[in-house]
Amino acid sequence: MRRALLCVSRGVHATPMMAGRFAALASMVGRPEVSWTHASVLQQRFASCAALANYIRTEIEDEKERAEKPVKPEIPSGWTVEHEPGNMFFKLCKTYEDEEIVLHFKGTREAEGDIFYDFKVFVVNGEKGVMFDLSYDHEIVVDRVIFLRDAKVAIKQSALGQPHDPFIYPGPKMEDMEDNVVEAFIRYLEARGVNDELGDFVLHYACWAEQVEYEQWLSDIHKFVA
């Protein structure tokens, strides 16, 4: 009814059909059964919002009182971390001689009962670079090594969650490479600070960030429905 009257008050000329609808709506105003139905709907709506708000408030209190919560880990020396609130994506950066090292956290996956923390590491020198697809479960595992002719574009796409160019040669699977080649790649990364200590930081930071985002999510939902 309010929307219909608003249209008229703003000078919108009603068509005959609209005028008929307005008249029908006007004739319903004041009817006991209509008012009762409207009140019943509002009561149900408020009750459902109140119930949800109460449940979420209880969850918020439980999380505040929970003793064993992830602690924000100390950043490894030489690295900086960037993490925007409301986003599970985070990145780490550092420099090594004339190279720029960038890490993008991708997320977690489960395989054979183990949880792996997946991330990309870009080693950039000028316009070109190398992208390492890595995972961590007590130790860093090299999955792929991809050469990039335009590293800046690849980093930007990765930060936006976009896949890299599907036509770029992805390199062989490391499991198909000779062990000494894989080991050489690991030594190359370790020289740039990409080691098991960094992998452990990624794991604990991801757990801490998830807890922070969960608590903020509870707070946002509670404010919205309360």
Image (cartoon, helix red, strand yellow):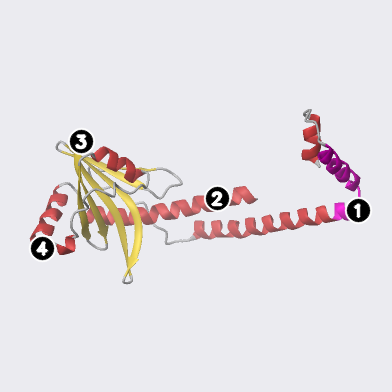
Q: Nearer the viewer, mark 1 or mark 2?
A: 1
Residue that label 1 marks = 32
Name the element at disc 4.
Answer: helix
Task: Give residue 84's quadrant in the image.
Answer: top left
Q: Secondary structure at mark 1?
A: helix
Q: Are marks 1 and 2 in contact (CB under 8 Å)?
A: no
Q: Does label 4 or label 1 sit earlier along the sequence?
A: 1
How far apart marks 3 and 2 lie (CA) works out to: 43 Å
**What crowding class fits label 1: few (fewer than 14 Cα within 10 Å), some (14-19), or many (20 or more)?**
few
- N-term-proximal mark, 1 vs 2: 1
Q: What residue would you read off at disc 2?
A: 219
How far separated are the C-alphas under marks 4 and 2?
Answer: 50 Å
CB contact under 8 Å: marks 3 and 1: no
- Of the 4 image quadrants, the one containing the N terminus is top right
**Which amino acid is tagged 3?**
Glu
Q: Which residue is mark 3?
A: 127
